[in-house]
Image (cartoon, rainbow, N blue to C red):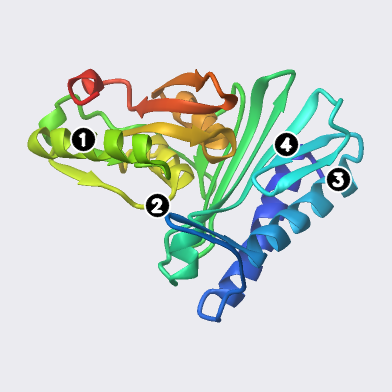
Amino acid sequence: MTELETAVHAAKEVGKMLRANFNRPKDVDEAHHHDLKLALDRESQDLITEIILKEFPTHAIYGEEGLAGDQSSDHQWIVDPIDGTVNFFYSIPHFCISIAKRVSEELVLGVIYDPMVDELWTVEKGGAMLLNGEPAEVSSREKLEESILFVGCGKDEEAMTSGLERFKRGSLRARKMRMMGSAALGMAYISCGRLDAYIESRISLWDIAAGQLMVEATGGKVDLVPHSDNPDVYSIVASNGKIPIEEIL
């Protein structure tokens, strides 16, 4: 299998497992005030790791649930096995599997799969972004008052305060604001024109890597500012590249 075929296969195999467990009780590994870690998070990443390293045993896995493979490799797979874990835990059908690959810090491949509606976004650097095999692009909306914006609030007090302030400002200007619980799906939605922008003050690389490549491949814009305490945690502004996001920053 090619790298893209391998990523798609891994995402769909995990999707089968998550659909099978969607309405079942879930085992909680860790419970925090604003977050959960499930046994299925680990099991999903383990399955992705097994599939990828079987095809590419010298590559590295960098995932939300830990590291695997040869961490000295320039070929690194960035994995979020369930983006939207809290939604999944409460049987809200808005979550996804996100897999990206970078070579020497350059993103070259992205896959996002929503198993509940069987939607698959794929992209390779330099190529078209496809939604279920068909080309897609960002929206043509230019006016903030016609746009739908997605704001993330993070998990710590500072990120939540910033997110809620942005949500309030955006609500006064945009057509609608959304907080949906999956950054990766938010990015995928921008890449196919469903949403117009996404803003969050603290988000991890595995949440946005695949989506970044998709948004940029379809004509959008992604601005990332790394946090000083962790270079793989960012402030993000992603958009269709047309609406004036600075008005709600």
Q: Residue furthest left?
A: 172
The residues tagged by marks 1 and 2 sit, at their Cα atoms, a distance apart of 17 Å
Q: To which residue does mark 2 refer?
A: 181
Q: Using a 10 Å C-alpha cutoff, classify the residue at mark 2 as few (fewer than 14 neighbours), some (14 to 19) or many (20 or more).
A: many
Residue 154: quarter of image? top left
Q: Is residue 142 above or below residue 19?
A: above
Q: Is residue 72 above or below residue 80?
A: above
The location of residue 63, given as percent across then percent down, is 68, 43
User: Which residue type carries mark 2?
Assistant: Gly
User: Which residue type carries mark 1?
Assistant: Glu
User: Are the residues at dot 2 and dot 4 in contact (C-beta closer than 8 Å)?
Assistant: no
Total marks shown come to: 4
User: Are the residues at dot 3 and dot 4 in contact (C-beta closer than 8 Å)?
Assistant: no
Q: To which residue does mark 4 refer?
A: 77
Identify which residue is drawn at 50% across, 79% down.
23
Q: Which mark is residue 165?
A: 1
Q: To which residue does mark 3 refer?
A: 53
User: Are the residues at dot 1 and dot 2 in contact (C-beta closer than 8 Å)?
Assistant: no
Give SS at disc 3.
helix
Mark 3 or mark 4: which comes first in sequence?
3
Mark 1 or mark 2: which comes first in sequence?
1
Mark 3 or mark 1: which comes first in sequence?
3
Mark 3 or mark 2: which comes first in sequence?
3
User: Which residue type carries mark 4?
Assistant: Trp
The location of residue 235, given as percent across then percent down, is 43, 26
The residues tagged by marks 2 and 4 sit, at their Cα atoms, a distance apart of 23 Å
User: Are the residues at dot 3 and dot 2 in contact (C-beta closer than 8 Å)?
Assistant: no
Which sits in the foreground, 194 or 249?
A: 249
Give SS at disc 4.
strand
User: Which residue type carries mark 3?
Assistant: Leu
Identify which residue is drawn at 40% across, 67% down.
92
